[in-house]
Image (spheres, rainbow, N blue to C red):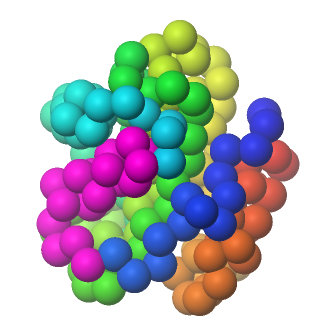
């Protein structure tokens, strides 16, 4: 599927305290890194998707995802927050980690759905969850996510 995440896309100590702050943080970083051109449009794409149903998953993870013309290239970002976020999840556990997927509208078909499916499966692996939740090396987090996406 190609490389979607590098250490530059991993943020281990995000100060966000709400779901919307995390989404704003992710969109801002996507623009800073050239993966998107319009922060507000990307935030809105994330929020529009969230309005269809929560992207909160299990084990303290959320997988916010957006397809938008503001996205210039497919990108995955991992954000771990210093505190717990109130985010509707399947297991009612607070979220501390978000793995975000952003794709241009033109890439919103099968590859986008495969990324989502692979990330959801990865969250069922206790070793993966423990690695992402505890690792202090951004490159190691990126490598764990990338390995799962390539599997």
Q: Nearer the viewer, residue 10 or 122?
A: 10
Q: Nearer the viewer, residue 112 or 33?
A: 33
* Outermost residue, top side: 106
Residue 59: give x, y in percent of width and height.
44, 72
Q: Quadrant of the N terminus?
A: top right
Residue 40: give x, y in percent of width and height.
20, 35
115 left or right, relative to 55 = right
139 left or right, relative to 100 = right
Magenta region's main secondary structure?
Answer: helix
Q: Residue at x 47, y 78 (%)?
A: 12
Q: Residue at x 50, y 39 (%)?
A: 34
Q: Residue at x 43, y 66 (%)?
A: 79
Residue 65: give x, y in percent of width and height.
40, 39
13 left or right, relative to 50 = right
Report whether residue 139 is seen: yes
Q: Residue at x 65, y 66 (%)?
A: 7
Residue 86: say if magenta: no
Residue 35: give x, y in percent of width and height.
50, 37
Report whether residue 85 is seen: no
Give the magenta range. Answer: 15-32
Q: Nearer the viewer, residue 77 or 125?
A: 77
Q: Quadrant of residue 57?
A: bottom left
């Amino acid at each position: 599927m190609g490389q979607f995440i590098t250490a530059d896309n991993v943020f281990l100590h995000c100060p966000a305290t709400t779901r919307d702050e995390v989404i704003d943080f992710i969109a801002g970083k996507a623009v800073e890194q050239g993966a998107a051109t319009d922060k507000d449009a990307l935030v809105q794409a994330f929020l529009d998707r969230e309005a269809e149903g929560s992207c909160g998953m299990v084990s303290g993870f959320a997988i916010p995802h957006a397809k938008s013309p503001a996205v210039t290239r497919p990108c995955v970002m991992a954000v771990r927050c210093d505190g717990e976020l109130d985010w509707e999840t399947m297991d009612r556990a607070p979220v501390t980690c978000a793995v975000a997927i952003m794709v241009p509208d033109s890439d919103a078909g099968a590859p986008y759905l495969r990324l989502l499916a692979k990330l959801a499966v990865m969250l069922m692996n206790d070793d993966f969850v423990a690695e992402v939740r505890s690792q202090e090396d951004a490159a190691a987090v990126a490598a764990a996510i990338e390995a799962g996406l390539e599997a």
